Amino acid sequence: MADVRFVAIGDSFTEGVGDVLPDGRERGWADLAAQGWADAAGHTLQYANLAIRGKLAWPIVEQQLEPALALRPTHLSFNGGGNDMLRPRTDVEHIADAFSRVLRRCDEEGVTMILLSGANPSGQLPMGSLVQRRGDLLSDAVLRRIEERPDVIRALNWPDRELSRGAYWADDRLHMNAAGHHRVAARVLHALGFEPPASWWAPNDRLGTGPSGLAYYREFVGPWVRRRVTRTSSGDGRTAKYPTWVERSPS
């Protein structure tokens, strides 16, 4: 069994939505960080990713945490709450309690927790000021819960003003593009004590080319509203892309 066994749980942020490869597969920061970790450490590690898009914070905990711990990881990453912040009624303290539950179970199983805050999309979104306010409150609530825990590895993306620029975001303005996922992966590697490739911190000079005005609302906002009305999720029927260990070796 590998010395490092890294499992990621979460929603679309961790699944990798927005970082689309030429063959149509979605990669994302967790895939990048796993490979970057193997490269920087110089040895093979095991990696699993149970994240599924559309999940609220507590369903992530209820559906993904125990299967992830059953893999006997050495490190577990968690991010959640991004979908909760888009709902009409959001209890920030209740969301933050999900982070406490994950940390408690990691402690019980002897697993090192990697905590991530999501990137901030509010500058591009309708009702962006509401998302900004809720995100600030959630970030503060989570940090209060771990302020006495220097052993928790932190990769805090919400305060990163550079990452909020449009160059890091996909056409839907809600998910990061490849540049955004690379920047988050760089922050994770840095938090782990490694020096990521310098190019991972910077965008690829891609300017937003997605739809605007009514076209944006038709393509992205309309389907989101329909899912809320019908109580469905973009993750319905989806399964985790790496539910069991895959090896990542130095490239």
Image: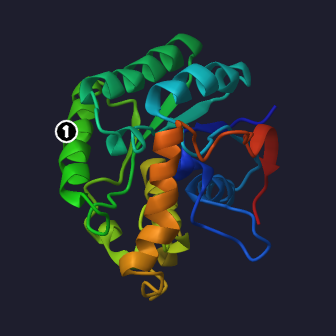
Q: Position of residue 32 (x, y in %)?
A: 62, 60
Residue extending farthest to the top is: 108
Q: In this view, does 92 lie to the left or right of 39?
A: left
Q: Residue at x 56, y 24 (%)?
A: 111
Q: Which residue is drawn at 34% across and 61% down?
A: 121
Instruction: Assign the N terminus to one quadrant of the image.
Output: top right
Q: Is residue 171 left or right of residue 249?
A: left
Number of numbered markers: 1
Helix, strand or loop status at disc 1? helix
Residue in the foreground of this view, choosing between 108 and 168: 168
Q: How crowded is mark 1: few (under 14 residues within 10 Å), some or many (20 or more)?
A: some
Q: Where is residue 205 in the image (x, y as percent from the top left)?
A: 44, 89
Q: Name the residue under label 1.
A: 137
Residue in the foreground of this view, choosing between 227 and 202: 227
Q: Where is residue 214 in the image (x, y as percent from the top left)?
A: 39, 77
Q: Residue at x 57, y 65 (%)?
A: 18
Q: Quadrant of residue 136?
A: top left
Q: Where is residue 217 in the image (x, y as percent from the top left)?
A: 42, 69
